[in-house]
Amino acid sequence: MSSPESAAAWKAIAARKQSSRASRIPSKWHIPSSALPKDPPSLENGPQNVLDLPRQFLSSAEIAITEDYTVESLLSALASKKLSCEEVAQAFCHRAAIAHQLTNCLTEPLFDSAVQRAKELDAYLAQNGRPFGPLHGLPVSVKDTFNVKGVDTSIGLAYLCEKPATENAPLVSLLLSLGCVIVAKTNIPQTLASLDSVNNVFGRTMNPINRLCTAGGSSGGEGVLVAMKGSILGIGTDIGGSIRVPAMCNGVYGFKPSNNRIPYGGQALTGREGMSRTSVQAVAGPIARSVRDIDVFLREVIPRATLWAEDCMPCPWPPSSPSSQQIQGSGPNGELVIGILRSDGNCTLLPPITTILNEVAVSLQGTNTRTGAKIVVKELLTPRAWTRSQSVMSKLMGVDGAVVMNHMITSTGEPLVPWMSTRFRAGKAQPLERVAELQAQRSQLEREMLNLWSEVDAHGRRRQTLDAIVCPVAPHPVPPIEGYNAVGMTSSWVLFDYPTGTVPVRSVVEDDLELGRPLPAGNVLGSWDAKCRELWDEHVTDRRVYLGTPLSVQVVVQRGRDDWLCRVMGVIDEVMKSQTQTQSGDVKARL
Amino acid sequence: MSSPESAAAWKAIAARKQSSRASRIPSKWHIPSSALPKDPPSLENGPQNVLDLPRQFLSSAEIAITEDYTVESLLSALASKKLSCEEVAQAFCHRAAIAHQLTNCLTEPLFDSAVQRAKELDAYLAQNGRPFGPLHGLPVSVKDTFNVKGVDTSIGLAYLCEKPATENAPLVSLLLSLGCVIVAKTNIPQTLASLDSVNNVFGRTMNPINRLCTAGGSSGGEGVLVAMKGSILGIGTDIGGSIRVPAMCNGVYGFKPSNNRIPYGGQALTGREGMSRTSVQAVAGPIARSVRDIDVFLREVIPRATLWAEDCMPCPWPPSSPSSQQIQGSGPNGELVIGILRSDGNCTLLPPITTILNEVAVSLQGTNTRTGAKIVVKELLTPRAWTRSQSVMSKLMGVDGAVVMNHMITSTGEPLVPWMSTRFRAGKAQPLERVAELQAQRSQLEREMLNLWSEVDAHGRRRQTLDAIVCPVAPHPVPPIEGYNAVGMTSSWVLFDYPTGTVPVRSVVEDDLELGRPLPAGNVLGSWDAKCRELWDEHVTDRRVYLGTPLSVQVVVQRGRDDWLCRVMGVIDEVMKSQTQTQSGDVKARL
């Protein structure tokens, strides 16, 4: 129990921290309180989409810089001096400042140092006649967890505030060495172990598309900042879904790589040091506006990771991506073979999720006339190993008994945030034998999963028969605040170390609200399932809450095939976009 | 303590097992006892090199098949039907049978099934007009630890005898699917944790070059069988040096890959299942007659590993190797930059080891006129992390307290073999917190090692400055039986997960025995160092014991760069061989 004194401790620290944060938003970038969305969010106030609101406060040049470029074209404009690093950094910082005022997405605005760094890069280019590095001037953001020298890595815990990092995380050093400009660090949930980005120090990050729904987590601030174009690309981390979930919630692309691809070290410790090497490891990865942006970024970062980070392996990245037409899959005629996985056996899919999977399956099948992609779609039976993986994963994530986290929370008298209050339990570390037992179970599940990807012939030779999986990110759409339920569909792929990414497909429209009316009864698969059903049960949830939120799918490939995941996400995205174009073409034709 | 009954248990099992093994050596392949070397080995009997002795009992065709081919040329002869799989299998099985009678290198002769399999491959080729797979008919051997369906995986423990495996290890399935023929399983030490391949079930494997010295371990049988040409390539496993040490002892090439490259699963468990995923993992890798043989073999195996094994990652292997002349290193003009590491700070190098390192350093430096290789050699200061890694590694290897192994040994009343008797200590598993602490120390050491490979410029950008390391395999030459001392120079690289290999350079000659006479006193670095010095101290060891044994070096590259290791080992081997040729040319010229 915390004494009144220690209770005061976290509050005083949080107040100082918030005030320091506010002081780093230049007053010229403040927006009038009349422009702010109405609190509290309610159905009466509507979703209050603020995605495009920053445009009102930006110059046309700033709008162009922050909206009209891809990573590739921005780099090209910077390298050719069409744009200066300084004006690009200014524009993104300005937009990030506005995004923050609308959603509370930042923990550490780094606008001064970003502009300073941008000026140095401009000077370097002027002096040397060549860019500083392959990502010269690229404005990026990083999750609060990453150490940036001289800046707190508080992860929203009072205990960690006002202890600035003494050196950069290896990934930060790598990004800087490539020429990136870091505009801000972004908000996360208390403990990093929930899917709503809220903590006692910085408060809650709001979803800019629909304020009734969650912004997701744990890289929630990143998802929001990238969706609002306050940085061109952001770095999150993921163990249960913390990159893919906020990407889903904010309608952007999230990429969870395999382990040992992107430097992970140099982040705030949420548990005992070294513990993750005994159990299961989180990874760092990008959240971005397009697959192509992710591809161009990772092509520069991943092959250089081993220079900076002891936790990375060499991973060549093909110098250029084949087009959708050129891509060779394992189908009989080189088709890409994509399997559809539906329920994981732990939660029934809610009707809009089944619908979006159906739409994707139908759109992908066959030769796409616009993109030239040749795809065979096959429905997969839910592997027993996928169903079981969720339980093994959740046990492995908890082997340390949350001892360190509990100490950090209680030492300043912090209360638990709402979602954690019923779920956080501190205990003690498991015996090594138990951890070994879980690891053995994990190996067994991994072995079982092999049979999903290949087949053995009569002579005992194996042949690849599946190239990628499409499955839901969650069994439910982007839920109301505090409503995120099951993470099994994201966390399981971390257990298997499969790279996976989120691809947004379309938004929830009025028609979707009619799906499953009345909700079919079906067999309740367990307590998670019961909770999940409430999200589409009109006795519990007003479905209008979902209007405008993104519907996304998850794309999954085999361990270590990260460049392949990028290819497949690109093909799927291109085909789905071509369908939308075709449909609108049809609509136009019919008008 | 074991009762007389249980003491009888292991003896009876071992007797049955030895008799079963003997029955699988066809009587037509028995060699007369007069041909056997004299026991016990002694300086009076001399080294009794039996490497070439099998030739006396083989037909000229069998000698040609087992001696005149590389992996590549043998595969080509098999695919073109110049040789049948059956005659190749017969020849290698015959030679393996003789090698075994001379050295006791096999645990499970698999001659019948090998010839049967070879016939099936011949039939397949005849019927289909194409080879079964890219390794069609290649005769290989595997360490006893690998499961082969229907055969014991006893690893020399009575407890595990007479329990045939119910399925193949993934690596065995993979090898069979590529067309390999498995001629035998090979001998190992009790517990697999020592460097002399001796156990109570199968006895001791002898070094075929010099019976006074150890055959090495734990893949000792593999080292011997490959050196005696009883298989063209063998698969060992390595955590402390168990591939590289027997390669050194028997004058062949050993390749310890990075983790997740070659399927490791499906082997005898020496500890609790899943334990290695919490601590440190052994790897499987080839022992062979040449670097080129290893290259050709791995090129087929590694890219297909993920089809069969949950413990592998994709690892493309370049389709063809650049020549020594073409290889591009990180030197200012593309030179290969090779660092020389000498003492690890735990043991002083004995004079012949310093000498062989000097010879290699001098030979490698500069442009080699015969091979065209351009190399910059630099002497490296011993990194603190390398010195410290040995202790962390040995603690991580012991976290399970040897509980399972102790149970297996004691349950049939087996005594410990001599080397283990003073070193094997069963205890209990460490607390998880302690294992996490060791893993944190490991990460810290890994981070420190990064600075060996690259440098940061004034602008904070990193550049590779080192391509490979040459260091000793051990601080001493191939020691007398039971004399193997320090494994720090091999085990440390497993802690770092660096791929490393053994390259034999030349044999110990009379002149070498004069080195360090008298032995310089120097500072004794610790108990391992004191023990090591005895191996060259004439008051303790008669140096003549070393005559004819191989002197080798270890080549080390960064984690995950396995194909690069193969390239660099090839260049070093080629340059050293060209030197020998030049020297013999000079000698001839002078005659």
Image (spheres, coloured by chain):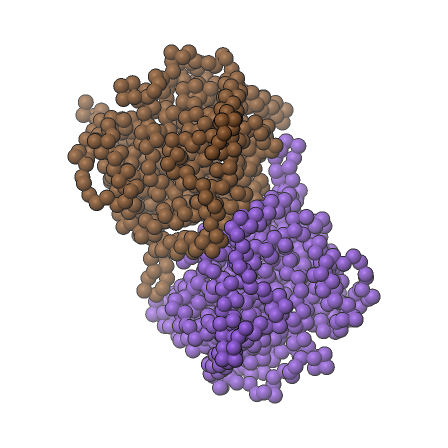
Chain colours: A brown, B purple
The residue closer to the viewer here, A53 or B563, is A53
The residue closer to the viewer here, A589 or B534, is B534
Residue drawn at x 33%, y 45% is A469
Left or right: B553, with B439 as reference point: right
Residue drawn at x 36%, y 67% is B129
Residue drawn at x 47%, y 30% is A414
The quarter of the displayed image where residue B479 is located: bottom right
Q: Residue furthest left?
A: A518
On screen, residue B421 above or below A19: below
The residue closer to the viewer here, A507 or B291, is A507
What is the quadrant of the N terminus of chain B in the image?
bottom right
Left or right: B49, with A370 as reference point: right
Left or right: A550, with B377 as reference point: left
Query: Is any atom of residue B556 visible in this view?
Result: no
Residue drawn at x 58%, y 83% is B56
Q: x and y percent of residue A562 in the render?
A: 44, 43
Q: x and y percent of residue A570 in the render?
A: 37, 37
Q: x and y percent of residue A162 in the render?
A: 56, 27
On screen, residue B286 above or below A423: below
Query: Is any atom of residue B12 visible in this view?
Result: yes
On screen, residue A40 above or below B277: above
Q: x and y percent of residue A373 in the render?
A: 32, 41
The residue closer to the viewer here, B590 or B105, is B105
